[in-house]
Amino acid sequence: MGGSTFSLSLILMLTASMLAVSMANKDWHFGFNYTNWPFKGGPPQSQNDIPGPRKIVVGGSENWQLNFNYTDWALKNGPFYLNDTLVFKYDPPTNDSTIPHSVYLLPNLWSFLTCDLRKAIMVANTTQGGGEGFEFVLKKWQPYYFACGERDGYHCKAGQMKFFVMPLFRQWH
Ligand SMILES: *[C@@H]1O[C@H](CO)[C@@H](O)[C@H](O)[C@H]1NC(C)=O
Ligand SMILES: *[C@@H]1O[C@H](CO)[C@@H](O)[C@H](O)[C@H]1NC(C)=O
Ligand SMILES: *[C@@H]1O[C@H](CO)[C@@H](O)[C@H](O)[C@H]1NC(C)=O
Ligand SMILES: *[C@@H]1O[C@H](CO)[C@@H](O)[C@H](O)[C@H]1NC(C)=O
Ligand SMILES: *[C@@H]1O[C@H](CO)[C@@H](O)[C@H](O)[C@H]1NC(C)=O
Ligand SMILES: [Cu+2]
């Protein structure tokens, strides 16, 4: 149903961002002027002028929770750059009415699309999102596939708690 269209658009998005990166890197060596580069455009508006790495709260004021479209959020708040910090905020499970969350890194696009956690790595457990939140630095030039690992992938699959980022180089010109 809607699932395959959704997956297709994700693949298209990833392909587009990879293409942008590889093209940009290629051009980089030729010293192009990036002022008008459509993909480089940089993070929109205010964030654009901050030269150093940014600290971004995942989901903004919605934090890290069920039924928020993080794919959409990542699209609208990207691109992200190397050394930017993503902050995951979620309440630790204090009683039965708190829904526990966590942060996992999935190994590849396919496990991301299918929310397959078998080879995923937990980067933050259910208590680490409390207080100021859990901070994850985008240190490497690679795609990062994030997902909540709770309920054996259910939060990822049905709760939309997943998104990916491909951090870009900040200093291109
Ligand atoms: C890059 O292009 C913009 C717009 O065309 C121009 O204003 C700027 O001076 C150029 N920068 C360099 C370093 O050539
Ligand atoms: C989430 O947002 C993406 C990108 O805007 C969109 O393609 C997708 O349909 C949305 N998912 C849901 C379940 O609304
Ligand atoms: C990221 O930070 C590390 C450590 O501070 C630094 O060595 C590295 O050059 C930075 N990378 C980029 C792309 O800014
Ligand atoms: C559970 O914990 C949350 C947050 O600490 C609190 O707001 C809520 O009232 C608690 N619920 C119960 C049933 O104790
Ligand atoms: C989560 O990780 C923190 C830091 O490593 C640790 O202190 C805590 O006991 C862990 N909590 C659970 C529920 O595993
Ligand atoms: Cu969750």
Image (spheres, rainbow, N blue to C red):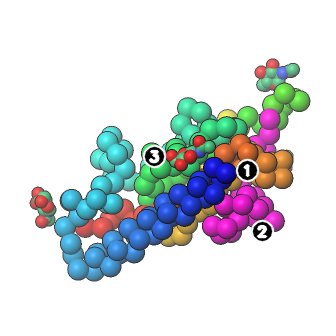
With 141 as the anchor, is 36 left or right in this view? left
Q: Please state, as top left, top right, bottom left or bottom right, where the C terminus lies in the image.
A: bottom left
Quarter of the rendering containing residue 70: top right
Q: Where is 59 relative to 136, above or below? A: above
Q: Residues within 10 Å of mark 3 (few under 14, many from 20)?
A: some
Q: Residues within 10 Å of mark 1 (few under 14, many from 20)?
A: some
Q: As rendered, which of 55 and 62 lies closer to the eye?
A: 62
Question: Looking at the image, which residue is at 73% across and 58% down?
Answer: 115
**Distance from label 2 to label 3 (Cα)?**
28 Å
Question: Looking at the image, which residue is at 62% across and 38% down?
Answer: 68
Quarter of the rendering containing residue 126: top right
Q: Where is mark 1, residue-wise?
A: 157
Quarter of the rendering containing residue 57: top right
Of tags 2 and 1, which is closer to the observer?
1
Residue 59, given in percent of the width and then of the height, sits at 57, 40
Q: As rendered, which of 154 and 136 lies closer to the eye?
A: 154
Range of residues picked out in magenta: 99-128
User: Is residue 120 visible from the viewing direction of this image?
Assistant: yes
* Amino acid identity at mark 2: Lys
Question: Looking at the image, which residue is at 54% across and 70% down?
Answer: 142
- Mark identifier at residue 119: 2
Q: Where is 38 relative to 26, above or below? A: above
Query: Which image quarter has ligand 2?
Result: top right
Of tags 3 and 1, which is closer to the observer?
1
**Residue 75 part of the magenta-drawn span:** no
**Distance from label 3 to label 1 (Cα)?**
22 Å
